[in-house]
Image: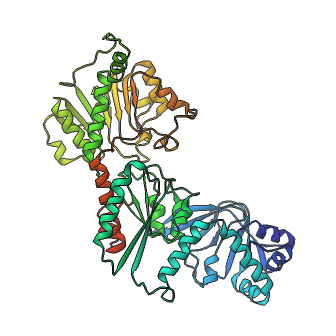
Amino acid sequence: MIMPNNTTDVAGVLASTHLFPGLDAVQLEAIAAETELVEFAGGDNICVEDDITAQSMYVIASGKAHVFKRNGNEQVKLISLNPGEYIGESLLENLPINATVVAAEQTTALRLNTTAFKRILNEHPVLAESLLRGLAKELRSFRTVLARSVSVARSRSSSVSKDTRTVVRMAVFDFMKHEKESFEAAVETFRSSLDPAMYAFEVQYYESKLDAKTVRLAAGCQVVCIFVNDTANAEVLTLLQAQGVQLLTLRCAGFDMVDLKAAAALGIAVTRVPAYSPYAVAEFAVTLALCLNRRMVAASGRVKQGNFSLAGLVGFDFHGKTVGVIGTGKIGQCFIKIMLGFGCKILCYDAYPSKDVATWENCTYVTLEELYSQSRIISLHAPLLPETKYMINKESLAKMVQGVVLINTSRGGLVNTQDLIQALKSGKVSGAGLDVYENEKSLYFEDHSLSVMEDDAYARLTTFPNVLVTGHQAFLTEEALEKIGAVTMENVRESLFEHKKGKELTNVVMQ
């Protein structure tokens, strides 16, 4: 429904956007005079993806709208638009609407005919000049983006350079000292394998994590490489796609930080390193279990203080004990083999049981309830999915044997920390080995030794003498780091240089 239009009020809405920087009140009112104020009920389409008849941009004046992109027969929600935000700027480049925008509630929007907007700029050169000055001022705050964009433009311009090579650029986020040597070696090996007459491969490393605030650092890159605590939600992916990113490649096996539906809708391929070293993680899980059982941390601390008492250091034989393994992928299988070497009986659970594991002696697939009720040690090797979130909680802990030892080297979100704390206090859990933590993103891989620990749950965990917490280091071996670098670069080769798509990619992650 078209509503009465107050030019001054509309100019105020236009001033709140980044679409018209640098314009004064008179210039904004000149544009406002060409707009219509339109009201939409919740659920109404404001504009529709690929509408070739669309002629107007929209600026949200009040309410909220959701942005969707089509992925097959499904509409995937990407971001929400609030007052002052806009859609339809692609029409200025004679391109169709690139997304469907739906009013989330009673919403009013300013409708600006793009033909009229172009005419205003042609007829009012002073206004056009002011708009360009304002845009330049806005862009100066993004110097990194500008520098990289200029570099991209120059490399692609035959008038500036005679270099006809294909240039591929990658931004690596959350890049840490421990991976520098191995990853940079993998990059150099990959670069040396390319024909220098045809290709150039450039890499920019950033210590900062990928999120909505740092996403602009990827401007001009076709590839973005991230790690476990980066953020690749719909908002970030939308911004990456707008900057020309084609591949999101993960330096890890887990992919819970990526909105896969949004990535698919935006046409961004997602790859990972599915098995950099299953031995590294499995061996670390066993190490945690052994250290907890035999009280190694307490024992070491005692003797350093001259205390050689053995009181409170009694453990139990692993031989003959029942061990529950949740998740029997490559890491889970390595863990099982090690525990079989101790002479343990293994109970397995996996949503997709392994036919091979099912044939192993002393290994049996059972229900979770059976696993909980019979296992003296339980080790988690499952991915973090909506259905596995907090699978270890008050209810599942209550089903476990008294004095169970719990090991988690997979994903912190599998365990409800508050429920685990209560189980530790009651003695239901006699020991917990945690290399991952549900709220680790703000803690791990950084030095907080001089800061006050604000995470009360984490602080409480570290007070238990029977809890061993490490900082997501189970994967950290020389072999694993080398494999991460090599596989990551192979993923880049397949996607950007061999132009493979979808299931053609060896390590693709699909919804």
> Who's the residue at 82% across and 67% down the image?
12
Q: Is residue 361 above or below residue 154?
A: above
Position of 43 with respect to 111 (left or right) is left
> Who's the residue at 76% across and 82% down the image?
129
Q: Give how far across and how far down residue 477 sits, in percent.
A: 30, 45
Q: Give how far across and how far down residue 89 sits, in percent.
A: 64, 76
Q: Is residue 107 visible?
A: yes
Q: Is residue 476 above or below residue 242?
A: above
Q: Quadrant of the N terminus?
A: bottom right
User: Which residue is nearer to you in this view: 287 or 353?
Assistant: 287
Q: Is residue 511 visible?
A: no
User: Which residue is nearer to you in this view: 17 or 391?
Assistant: 17
Q: Quadrant of residue 92?
A: bottom right
User: In this figure, what is the number of numbered marks?
Assistant: 0
Q: Quadrant of residue 139?
A: bottom right
Q: Quadrant of the C terminus?
A: bottom left
Q: Is residue 439 above or below residue 25?
A: above
Q: Give how far across and how far down residue 345 sits, in percent.
A: 19, 30
Colouring rule applied to residues: rainbow
Q: Give how far across and how far down residue 266 sits, in percent.
A: 48, 68
Position of 98 with respect to 223 (left or right) is right
User: Which residue is nearer to you in this view: 12 or 345?
Assistant: 12
> Who's the residue at 46% across and 34% down the image?
416
Position of 157 with respect to 367 (left or right) is right
